[in-house]
Image: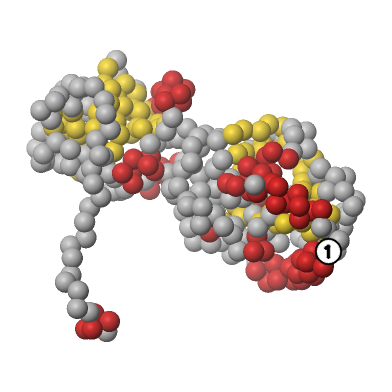
Amino acid sequence: MLGACTTTVPTVPTQPAVVIPPGPPVTVDIATLPGKWGLASYSDEKDRARTQAEARSACGNPYVIAKGPQGGVLMHLPDQAQPSEVFVKVSPDGRSFIGPRGAPGMIQDRVVMFYQGGVLITEWLDPSARERYGTLLFVRC
Amino acid sequence: MHRKSLKSLLAQAAGVAIAAVVGFGLALPGAAEAKQRKEMAIQDQPGYVPSAAEERLPAQYRPQPVYFRTTEPPGTIVVHTNERFLYLVQDGGRAIRYGIGVGRDGFTWQGLVKITRKSEWPDWRPPPEMIQRQPYLPRFMAGGPGNPLGARALYLGDTVYRIHGTNQPQTIGHAVSSGCFRLVNPDVIDLYSRVPVGTKVVILQSAKL
């Protein structure tokens, strides 16, 4: 009803701006990602060490990354109950992103902050997901 | 600021305004009986950070001084689950009353315990059924503003039960599926600052006059 009276031009909902958190270039070999991971999160860097210990102890209920049919891996996008096939994408400055096919730095991507010694640390680029879930820390089981 | 306003209100406990509050408070048990324990249909929202406006509760659930008849000594916490109120007993037949939400665990027991531990920004572990529904959730979330356990936790005895904060202010005044006794974060911070470890906590499932 109200729509019939409107004089405004319909607008396409805009996605929130992607802000890439600062961090070092990180190399990720996608072939090393499949497997079982303990998953925990933190918001404050001072909690990182104990969060890592908690992630390790979460291997009894692991987050499972499987190989995807197109050469990627199956992981979840923000708030999606079912996993999607995602790929490692590298930006010109050497930052690695894990997300759907496309340019590095899409809003559905995670940016890799650290990957070494069986520890993978990522952050969502979606500001809402990043605020809600903080920094995600995976420890290989 | 919040605490100061409470103190000044307490200093006026003999005032007419307080008498009105008492009158309202006496009427509540009947209303609470009718409310039953029907759970609010809401799941935990890990990571959700409520705004200050959301944390401003309806008037009856905001912390306020009330007359409170009890034989418990000042400093005791009395939780009335059916009323959805927590009372911190004060001198002179008064108490500070806080609105609470009661989780399923909170209805499973009553009795007397003591606060054995206090924690700021407690960590949270989503229950297994939640991980099953949302497999992307971290199995552990270090304490922080979006944590479902909120800003503070007061652990009760050697049980898993606790008085804690929440990132879901809309659940205050309701029965909910998860947790135990929840207050909005500004209120649990206020309560936390007023009670030491060793504080006696009385849990009552039915209001008694």
Instruction: Estimate how packed mark 1 is, as few (under 14), some (14 to 19) or many (20 or more) residues with alpha carbons within 10 Å.
Output: few
Which residue is pictured at 23% across the width and 83% down the height? Answer: A5
Quarter of the image where one finds residue A39: top left
Which residue is pictured at 66% across the width and 33% down the height? Answer: B118
Percent position of residue A88, x then y: 15, 31
Nearer to the camera, B173 or B6: B6
Q: Is B168 situated left or right of B157 in this image? A: left
Q: Is residue B67 above or below residue B129?
A: below
Q: Is B15 situated left or right of B85 in this image? A: right
Q: Is B72 situated left or right of A39 in this image? A: right
Which residue is pictured at 72% across the width and 57% down the height? Answer: B64
Q: Is B12 situated left or right of B162 in this image? A: right
* Location of mark 1 (residue): B15
Percent position of residue A24, x then y: 24, 22
Q: Secondary structure at mark 1?
A: loop
Q: Is residue A88 above or below residue B181?
A: above
Q: Is residue B182 above or below residue B37?
A: above
Q: Name the subunit of mark 1.
A: B
Quarter of the image where one finds residue A60: top left
**Any part of residue B204 in sight:** no
Which residue is pictured at 21% across the width and 60% down the height? Answer: A13
Residue type for callout 1 = Gly
Nearer to the camera, B124 or A18: A18
**Any part of residue A90 in sight:** yes
Percent position of residue B191, x then y: 69, 44
Q: Quadrant of the C terminus of chain B?
A: bottom right
